[in-house]
Amino acid sequence: MKMEFKNKVVLVTGGARGIGKAIAKIFLQNGAKVFICDKEQKLCKNSKRKFGENSVIFNKCDVSKDEDFQAAYSECENKFKGLDILVNNAGIVDKDIRKLEAVNFKNGIAEYNKS
Ligand SMILES: NC(=O)c1ccc[n+]([C@@H]2O[C@H](COP(=O)([O-])OP(=O)(O)OC[C@H]3O[C@@H](n4cnc5c(N)ncnc54)[C@H](O)[C@@H]3O)[C@@H](O)[C@H]2O)c1
């Protein structure tokens, strides 16, 4: 199946490592511009080198904090002029049910969708 994502803007939460990083890479390989939100500041320098300075942006963001996600979303809109696809991948496994709920279910994205 051919995937057409040329110049589509994709926001991937939790895209610094693991499944999110793999998703970001596939979109980049298929021509998309990728905005990565992750609480770990591990900028994918290799991705910038490989896919171009203007194809990928990293934003340090904790998706469980509404203000963080709003700021990230605004930066994505300003720099990439829109948003086509949202991959809500960030998630944790934690014994503390409140922490788990804040990141996995009641994150800034959920709050944004309500508005
Ligand atoms: N790996 C599996 O077998 C598996 C199975 C089922 C579901 N999942 C889900 O898939 C998603 C990705 O899994 P993974 O194995 O790649 O996880 P991972 O722990 O390797 O990576 C998760 C990424 O999300 C980021 N992150 C965590 N909390 C965040 C927050 N509050 N704000 C911003 N970024 C945050 C982390 O820094 C990390 O880069 C998760 O939601 C996980 O629950 C994974």
Image (cartoon, helix red, strand yellow):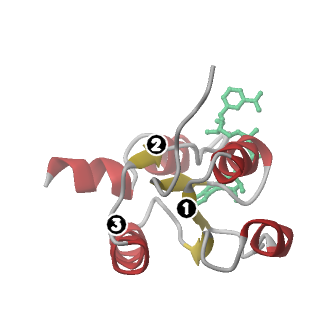
Question: Measured from the top left, where is residue 42 in percent x and y?
Answer: 78, 72
- Residue type pointed to by label 2: Glu
Question: Measured from the top left, where is residue 49 in percent x and y?
Answer: 82, 75
The residue at which mark 3 appears reads as 66
Element type at mark 3: helix
Q: Give the side of residue 29 with respect to residue 113, left or right.
A: right
Q: CA distance from mark 3 to mark 2?
A: 14 Å
- Residue type pointed to by label 3: Asp
Q: CA distance from mark 3 to mark 1?
A: 24 Å
Element type at mark 2: helix
Question: Measured from the top left, where is residue 102 in percent x and y?
Answer: 45, 50
Q: Upstream in the sequence, badge 3 or badge 1?
A: 1
Task: Work out which residue is located at the far top of the displayed protein and give it.
Answer: 1
Label 1 Cα neighbours within 10 Å, binned few <14 / some 14-19 / many ≥20: many
The residue at which mark 2 appears reads as 101
Looking at the figure, which quarter contains the C terminus?
bottom left
At x 79%, y 69%, the residue is: 44
Q: Which mark is residue 33?
A: 1
